[in-house]
Image (spheres, rainbow, N blue to C red):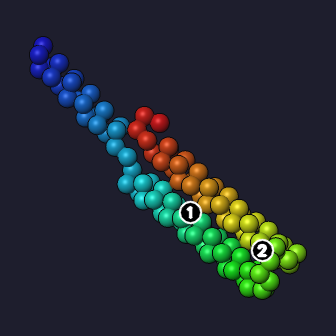
Amino acid sequence: MSRIRIAAVTVALVATSACNRTDPAAERTADALENQADAIRESGDARADAMEDKADQMDNRADGIDSPVEQRMESQAARVRDRAEDKADAVEDKADRVRDRNEPNN
């Protein structure tokens, strides 16, 4: 009788440990998606920064007031930054979904 219990416990432990493993391929996919999101965010920031720098160079007055052209360019830069942030967030959400599907007991 004790051998049957030992065998049952062993089977249960093996089954439990198999269920608690994560898929390395899914984890690598999620990591790659997060790296992609970082790259999207960094690229958007760099583009927006360049646009803002160009806008600053166009207005050479030292009065502290932005010209209408500079304001428009800075608004465009803000939109570029926001779009990049939204895209990066969407990619990070996808990475989270990959990880969630890969979690044990899901």
| Residue 97 image position (x, y, % from top left) | 55, 47
Q: As rendered, which of 42 and 12 lies closer to the eye?
A: 42
**Quick check: can you spot residue 53?**
yes
Q: Quadrant of residue 73?
A: bottom right
Q: Residues within 10 Å of mark 1 (few under 14, many from 20)?
A: many
Q: Which mark is residue 64?
A: 2
Q: As rendered, which of 48 and 57 lies closer to the eye?
A: 57
Q: Quadrant of residue 89?
A: bottom right
> Which amino acid lies under the numbered mark 2 shown in the image of this protein?
Gly
User: Is 6 situated above or below 69?
Assistant: above
What is the secondary structure assignment of the residue under circle 2?
A: loop
Q: Which mark is residue 37?
A: 1
Q: Quadrant of residue 48?
A: bottom right
Q: As rendered, which of 89 and 52 lies closer to the eye?
A: 52
Front disc: 2 or 1: 2
| Residue 59 image position (x, y, % from top left) | 79, 83
Q: Residue at x 59, y 51 (%)?
A: 93
* Contact between labelled residues 1 and 2, with CB atoms less than 8 Å apart: no
What is the secondary structure assignment of the residue under circle 1?
A: helix
In the rendered structure, the answer to whether residue 4 lies left or right of residue 27 reads left
